[in-house]
Image: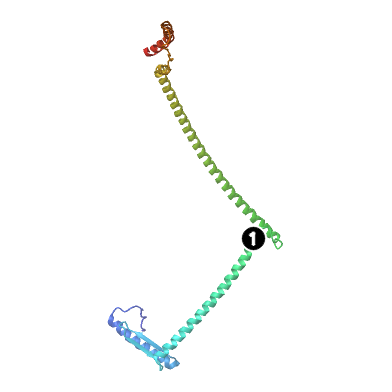
Amino acid sequence: MGRGRVELKRIENKINRQVTFSKRRNGLLKKAHEISVLCDAEVAVIVFSHKGKLSEYSTDSCMEKILERYERYSYAERQLVSMDSETQLQGNWTVEYSRLTAKIELLQRNRRHYLGEDLDSLTLKDLTGLEQQIDISLKQIRARRNQLMNETISDLQKREKAAREENNLLEKKIKERGKMVAVEQQQQQQEMQWEQQNHGPASTSSYLLQQPLPCLNIGGGYEDGTQEIRRNDLDLTLEPLYSCHLGCFAA
């Protein structure tokens, strides 16, 4: 009966793990020696245990030479891979450049066709397709233009409505202000009439009192009879004035 297949996973038992490590390490080093002898190959094996213990094997040449050879090979391999990558990248850039150039030429040719230029190379089918494409584009352009016009008209209507409301509000304020001014003027007129009614006679009497009286120049060289006549005349002249003043005072 053959041995069953061992499941590859970490051995939890420390003793069993150490025993397995020793057996497998010895078998690995033995296989390395066999391949170096049988195939005349340079072999280097380095093994570190979980505790850090080093186990190594190398062919007749020392380990350092094998490692130096490995470093030289790895560096050369990396350089080759890098060059291949750069070459591939350059090739990709070339392909991309060619693709973009062709796309630009196609776009420029289509633009000339849309402008009605360079149509000699087009067939009837191509011209029909171009016409249909232009018609579709015109429909889209008209639809967008109509949409913008409707939006503009709607905006203007809103502004007009707002301006109308503002005008109505201003007109209302102006009317209210006019009413207030009319009321103030009416009140001022009533006050002036009241003042005229209450202070009218007093002002007339004051005006009369401010008028100068006639100057009486009576010389001492006249005769007594003549002086008496003049006094009588003056009394007759001043009598209406005195009576007017007395009437004003009585009022």
In the rendering, at what x and y percent does residue 181 appear? 45, 29
Q: Secondary structure at mark 1?
A: helix
Amino acid under disc 1:
Arg
In the rendering, at what x and y percent does residue 203 appear? 41, 19
In the rendering, at what x and y percent does residue 35 appear? 42, 90
Q: Which residue is depicted at the point 50% across and 36% down?
A: 167
Q: Nearer the viewer, residue 249 or 242?
A: 242
In the rendering, at what x and y percent does residue 111 appear? 64, 60
**Residue farthest toward the right in the current orientation of the protein:** 120
Number of disc labels: 1
The answer to whether residue 210 is above or below residue 226 is below
251 to the left or right of 129: left
Q: Quadrant of the C terminus?
A: top left
Q: Quadrant of the N terminus?
A: bottom left
Q: Nearer the viewer, residue 166 or 152?
A: 166
**Residue farthest toward the front in the current orientation of the protein:** 221
Q: Which residue is depicted at the point 55% across and 75% down?
A: 90
**What residue does disc 1 label?**
111
